[in-house]
Image (cartoon, coloured by chain):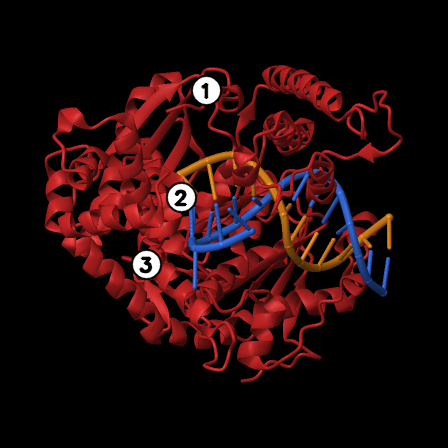
Chain colours: A red, B orange, C blue
Amino acid sequence: MPIDIKNPNFEYIETQEELNKTAAVLSREAVLAVDLEADALDPYTLKVLLLQIGTEDKAYVFNGKLDLTPLKEILLDERILKLLQNGKFDYEALKASKGFSINNIYDTMLAERILTTGLIRENSLGAIAKKYLNITLDKDYENYNWQEVGLTGRITQKHLKYAALDVLVLFPIFKKQFEEIKKQKLIEVSKLEFRLLPVVAEMELRGTRIDVKKWHQNIEALKARRDEIVVQIQRELKPYYKIQQVDLFGSSDKVLNLNSPIQIVEAFRKLGIDLPSTGEAVLRKVNHPVAQLMLQYREAEKLITAFGENFLEKIHKKTKRIHPDFMQIGADTGRFACSNPNLQQIPQDSSFRGCFIPAEGYKLVVADYSQIELRIMAELSGDKVFLGAFDKGEDLHMKTAVNMYNVKEEQVDKKMRTAAKTINFGLMYGRGAASIGAQIGVGPDEARVLLDKYFKAYEGVKAWLDKAGKQAVKDGYSQTLSGRKRWYIMPDKGDPNYERLLANIERQGKNTPIQGSSADITKYALINIYDRIKKEGLDAYITHTVHDEIVTEAKESDVAAMTKVISEEMVNAGRQLLKKVKVEVDVKASDFWEH
DNA sequence: GGGCCGAGCCAC
DNA sequence: AAACGTGGCTCGGCCC
């Protein structure tokens, strides 16, 4: 039965008695659609205005002022499948404001992302409703200003219809979308992502604690250093410019903004130097004091702006902690992306990471996988030498250096090992000889020789990389060990960039199974850890994750138990997907973020 | 003044 | 700036 958009079938529940009765009816359903409307987006301050729960043909719209407790069991019930669109929001809103959790979720937004990874990013309810049902949902914010509803308490019939429709469309969307999921054999990865959703929501709610005083001190020190550098640059450029950043005296009226690449190119021209760009790699090769000073300036300036005072503005007024936004299928490979702020790009330096601290009476338990991507490459390629090295617990970069330079282990110096490491990682990114050579400081021909030796030592790796690249182009998609797919938009034969675009896809085809399988493993680990914490009743929380690393916070009395849990479950998750290669995890309990 | 884009650079 | 995979943040500079 098609949905009547103009007159959706719904009932507005305004009394406690009706709510109690309806809850009893709904608890017998196998599938329910769930959505809520709130007056804001922040789970810790928002007010739930409406909670909608729908069956296939009727939506029940509950007034948020009622005691919603009778509905709690329904949301928790593992036997009832709950359909949600972007359920992370609803989960966090209900958890923070009512203390409710939601089990057994099917998320239409995540499902759509899984079905179209690499192709489009149109996962809004409006876009999905259009795609599967060919209907247009009126999403005009002005017409349905929930913030205003929250203030005035006036809910119109129009608001109620809109709210009802949002749950009613989820059923037909689910049916069609799930058929596609089955057809594409994406059941396993869908289950993974759906089970992960509450884990991510809880992780965001927990957030992480920052040592504000230490953060300030760090920034002040950086500012002082930057200002010194600017004074030195000013000294050098005195004949030509005043530097905007200090606005010091100079013999010229011209003002130079050190943050402007265009102006920097011009400034170097005055010094008699033509720059192809002002990037780090170029400046490093310029033999002039200003170039070196610019590099130092950039480094300090970057840290001050990107990780300065504005970072502290992200501290939540109520919780006093930072609650970043984790997008669980952020990257097309399946990796998380993180924003507001991005905790996945905090400088490794202890002056920054040392500011991430546990709550009073807690410790951080930090764990990361050891060389997980190389292990995945060993698994995928089945390369005997790679597998053997991991099996014997050898240092793979060292072993690679031995093979590349035809020397004994004792003869491998730091430079050789670094070069070997660059090659090991570079090949996973599909890098070529010229590019790798440039980084390790040799010409393309010499790099070619090293690569040839590498591939001779690891024949399986070479064969797999070639195959993975070709297959991406041939199939139009890549796959990870969970079955996750990433599709590629194939270029037209007539495209002037045809060859270059195909080469891009080949590189992505080499990298995606590796990077994506790593993401799969970390995601399984997060779920496993979350379940174990609950099962063992530990006073512990996942606070954030950085690709191959999981950071948790545990009550001091539970630190030992948590250390065991995190280590076991990360290894278990690895073993779920990696059958041929050993998985190793480093765990450390600490008073700040380190490993 | 807001939107958008590229440059540059932080992470894994 | 480049034949290096995945992201996000801040800035300058351009457009309307």
Residue A57, horizontal then vertical, whole percent: 55, 76
Asked if both marks, 2 and 3, belong to the same chain, the answer given is yes
Is residue A360 shown left or right of residue A150? Answer: left
Q: Is residue A475 visible?
A: yes
At x 35% / y 17%, what residue is drawn? Answer: A557
Q: Nearer the viewer, residue A30 or A392?
A: A392
Is residue A581 shown left or right of residue A342? Answer: left
Q: Which residue is mark 3?
A: A510
Q: Name the amino acid, label 1.
A: Phe
Residue A42, horizontal then vertical, whole percent: 65, 43
Q: Nearer the viewer, residue A309 or A408?
A: A408
Badge 3: residue crowd in 10 Å (few <14, some 14–19, many ≥20): many
Of marks 3 and 1, the one in the foreground: 3
Q: Which residue is mark 1?
A: A592
At x 70% / y 34%, what residue is drawn? Answer: A271
Disc 3/disc 1 C-alpha distance (Å): 36 Å
